[in-house]
């Protein structure tokens, strides 16, 4: 895989390189729930093992009902997929047009998926100097160039910036005026659900929301995601993939995950608390500039000293993995991203950073 499409979470490659088992590495590069999967999810996986002798439910009925209850949105508005990445690849094939604008820095798979479907891509680059805020006047001007689709993530990845609902609604209005279809990636919205634009988008002919089950619920290895859209779009998107792309265990895990209210509440509180204290500790380094985050990861800029790639190399012998963000469009070689892990794991990283920078 080329450098421009690298991702966090390549723990198996790293562990092989170091000659240790994956569980000996503290992975700050992938932003996954530090509490791991819920016990209800674990139980549902074990209980579902015997049903693996049958094909998965292609209608995803139980999971869609759990989603409907969770979001208070009817089941017809959901499309279930093998991770939201599958949807990112199917959407360009579903949409008419060939020119997309991507609000960047952003997830590298948007460009890759669009290019695979022969779309042209341009970037609307947000700057760290402005805390990655979106100038809607400039965006309106950019959209005048005639884009068929706009890709935007909220909360933004890798910056962690959460755009208020009114900003997203304003951007949505700009898209309608420009005849541009809006793809809103809310992969990390479970950490700040009240800011979701789902109520606006659910009836729209002109937009779709992508959601991930793997970050907040701690099951990236199972691959599960979904889209929220109007019923017609949901049906069209559903027909894009082949049958059985979502396996039985993923569906069972997703259904259980949405029902475990206690674990979900605990996650929100834990991440909020740990993010605050981790942020405060990282902010003590005079070599760092930090960017406010509403998610379970923090973007850091090294303002003096080494590059993010050099820092990543320094941490590997300590079996610590961070996300070097130099490959993100609009970011320099000085940016890295760290997940909010457990209190103990965060301390291990902070101690190592102390040795490197002091």
Image: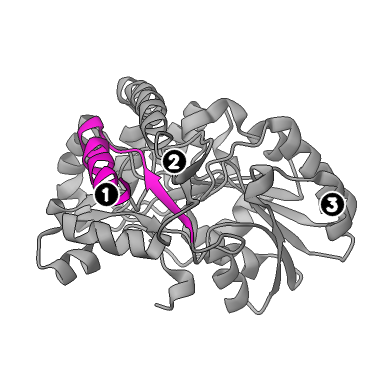
Q: Nearer the viewer, mark 2 or mark 1?
A: 2
Q: Is residue 211 above or below residue 13?
A: above
Residue stretch in magenta: 334-358
Q: Nearer the viewer, mark 3 or mark 1?
A: 3
Q: Quadrant of residue 95?
A: bottom right
Distance CA(mark 2)–CA(mark 3)? 34 Å
Residues at marks 3 and 1 touching, judged by CB atoms closer than 8 Å: no
The stretch drawn in magenta includes residue 83: no
Distance CA(mark 3)–CA(mark 1)? 45 Å
- Helix, strand or loop for disc 1: helix
Which disc number belongs to residue 249? Answer: 1
Mark 2 highlights which residue?
286
The stretch drawn in magenta includes residue 342: yes
Q: In this view of the protein, can residue 214 be seen by the observer?
A: no
Badge 2 or badge 3: first in the primary sequence: 3
* Residue found at x 87% / y 66%: 145
Mark 3 highlights which residue?
138
């Amino acid at each position: 895989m080329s450098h421009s499409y690298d991702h966090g979470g390549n723990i198996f490659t790293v562990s092989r390189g170091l000659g240790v088992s994956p569980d000996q590495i503290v992975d700050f590069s992938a932003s996954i729930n530090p509490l791991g999967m819920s016990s209800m999810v674990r139980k549902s996986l074990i209980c579902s093992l015997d049903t693996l002798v049958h094909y998965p439910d292609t209608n995803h009925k139980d999971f869609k009902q759990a989603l409907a209850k969770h979001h208070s949105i009817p089941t017809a508005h959901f499309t279930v997929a093998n991770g939201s990445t599958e949807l990112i690849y199917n959407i360009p094939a579903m949409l008419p047009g060939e020119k997309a604008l991507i609000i960047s820095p952003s997830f590298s798979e948007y460009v890759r998926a669009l290019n695979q479907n022969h779309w042209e891509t341009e970037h609307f680059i947000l700057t760290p100097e402005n805390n990655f805020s979106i100038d809607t006047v400039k965006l309106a001007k950019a959209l005048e160039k005639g884009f068929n689709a706009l890709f935007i993530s909220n909360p933004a990845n890798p910056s962690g910036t959460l755009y208020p609902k009114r900003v997203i609604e304003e951007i949505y209005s700009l898209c309608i005026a420009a005849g541009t279809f809006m793809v809103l990636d809310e992969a990390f919205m479970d950490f700040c659900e009240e800011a979701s634009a789902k109520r606006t988008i659910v009836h729209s002919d002109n937009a779709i929301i992508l959601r991930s089950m793997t970050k907040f619920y701690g099951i990236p290895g199972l691959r599960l995601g979904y889209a929220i859209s109007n019923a017609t779009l949901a049906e069209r998107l559903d027909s894009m993939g082949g049958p059985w792309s979502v396996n039985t265990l993923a569906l069972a895990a997703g259904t259980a995950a949405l029902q475990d209210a206690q674990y979900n509440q605990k996650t929100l509180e834990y991440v909020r608390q740990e993010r605050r204290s981790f942020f405060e500790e990282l902010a003590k380094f005079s070599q760092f500039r930090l960017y406010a985050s509403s998610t379970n990861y923090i973007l850091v800029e090294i303002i003096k000293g080494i590059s993010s790639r050099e820092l990543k190399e320094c941490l590997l012998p300590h079996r610590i993995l961070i996300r070097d963000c130099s490959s993100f469009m609009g970011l320099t070689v000085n940016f890295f991203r760290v997940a909010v892990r457990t209190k103990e794991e965060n301390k291990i990283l902070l101690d190592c950073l102390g040795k490197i920078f002091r």
